[in-house]
């Protein structure tokens, strides 16, 4: 009887161990990072050291059967988790997501900084793709950049997401959110890029909803009269492109020789200067029916004074200066 017992005991012990190995583990909320380029054995080690699996053997057995590709990245675990659930997360790439808020009027340089700080992708990597004419052409744009077409919204991206994935997500959101507006663009005699460029200038000039159609009217009225647009945010964008923007616009900046400088060059800037929201995109299609050609901002109220003549414009400027002496 002793020999059969000696043979049975190891089998029973192994069975108990396997049952134990596959039992769920309770995990306090924890993020585990799986580096890129490591093998399955090292992944098992990381998961075991982090305490999200009881046994490397259990995970190895699952991997031997399923043979799925295990994705690198950040993964979040909380509560009771089984090795099957852990394996599923890694094999399906169900990574931890980081909330990224892109506000209306953000340009690609702002977005690059937001993504960099969130750990989604590196600032310089995002800009390399966002300013690529090849990438823009791939999305059917005639523009040399993705500026204007990365819709401002709240997004959720995992750490180390490829910039193209970010751009693709934001561009598809632009298409979705503007589906009802885009058919009207050609009716207004505009190209897609012209429409978004006008909207981007409106977005940067005011956040007041009631002012947006008025700003749009000034832009179109000046274009019809072949007047320079003379819009400050276009100069700021020119400085940003050159890495010269320090937060304050000076009189000297208005003479910078750059195609985005609408004080120096006639017509629209070459591309949008930011990523406008829906209200600005709508205003660019529905300008107010007014004859305004000028506007000046009240710096404290942040409201604009509009005028149809240069003499009235000068009086508005003088009125604001007197108000804040």
Image (cartoon, rainbow, N blue to C red):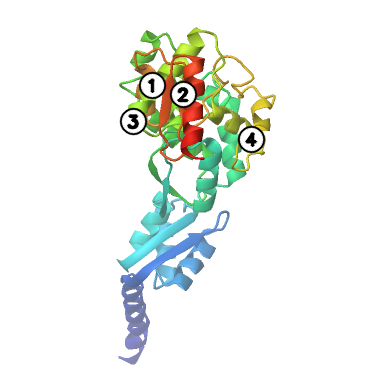
Please name the residue that numbered disc 4 is placed on.
Answer: 250
Is disc 2 placed on a helix, strand or loop?
A: strand
Separation (CA) of disc 3 from disc 2: 16 Å
Q: Looking at the image, which is closer to me, 254 or 298? A: 298
Q: Position of residue 77 (x, y in %)?
A: 37, 63
Residue displayed at 43% across by 51% down:
68
The disc at residue 214 is 1
Above or below, comparing residue 250 to residue 183 in the picture? below
What is the C-alpha distance between the residues marked 1 and 3? 10 Å
Q: CA distance from mark 1 to mark 2?
A: 9 Å
Mark 1 nearby-residue class (10 Å; few <14, some 14–19, many ≥20): many
Q: Which residue is mark 2?
A: 295
Q: Quadrant of residue 85?
A: bottom left
The mark total stands at: 4
Could you tell which of marks 3 and 2 lies nearer the N-terminus?
Answer: 3
Q: Residues within 10 Å of mark 4 (few under 14, many from 20)?
A: few
Provide residue 48's location: percent of width, then percent of height.
45, 71
The answer to whether residue 235 is left or right of residue 16 is: right
Q: Which mark is residue 209?
A: 3
């Amino acid at each position: 009887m002793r020999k059969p017992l000696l043979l049975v005991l190891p089998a029973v012990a192994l069975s108990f161990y396997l049952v134990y190995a596959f039992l769920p583990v309770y995990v306090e909320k924890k993020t585990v990072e799986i580096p890129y380029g490591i093998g399955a054995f090292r992944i098992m080690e990381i998961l075991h050291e982090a305490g999200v699996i009881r046994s490397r053997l259990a995970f190895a057995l699952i991997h031997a059967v399923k043979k799925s590709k295990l994705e690198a990245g950040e993964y979040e675990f909380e509560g009771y988790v089984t090795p099957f659930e852990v394996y599923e997360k890694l094999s399906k790439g169900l990574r931890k997501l980081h909330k990224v808020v892109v506000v209306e009027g953000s340009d690609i340089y702002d977005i690059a900084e937001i993504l960099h700080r969130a750990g989604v992708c590196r600032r310089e990597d995002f800009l390399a793709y966002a300013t690529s004419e090849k990438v823009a052409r791939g999305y059917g744009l005639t523009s040399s950049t993705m500026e204007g077409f990365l819709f401002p919204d709240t997004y959720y991206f995992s750490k180390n997401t490829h910039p193209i994935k970010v751009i693709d997500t934001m561009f598809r959101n632009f298409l979705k959110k503007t589906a009802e507006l885009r058919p009207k663009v050609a009716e207004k005699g505009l190209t897609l890029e012209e429409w978004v460029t006008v909207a981007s200038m409106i977005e940067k000039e005011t956040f007041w909803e009631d002012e947006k159609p008025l700003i749009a009217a000034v832009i179109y009225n000046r274009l019809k009269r072949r007047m320079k647009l003379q819009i400050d945010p276009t100069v700021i964008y020119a400085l940003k492109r050159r890495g010269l923007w320090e937060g304050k616009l000076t009189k000297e900046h208005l003479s910078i020789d750059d195609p985005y400088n609408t004080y120096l060059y006639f017509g629209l800037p070459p591309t949008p200067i930011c990523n406008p929201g829906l209200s600005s995109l709508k205003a660019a299609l529905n300008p107010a029916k007014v004859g305004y050609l000028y506007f000046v901002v009240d710096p404290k109220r942040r409201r604009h004074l509009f005028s149809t003549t240069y003499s009235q414009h000068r009086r508005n400027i003088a009125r604001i200066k007197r108000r804040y002496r």
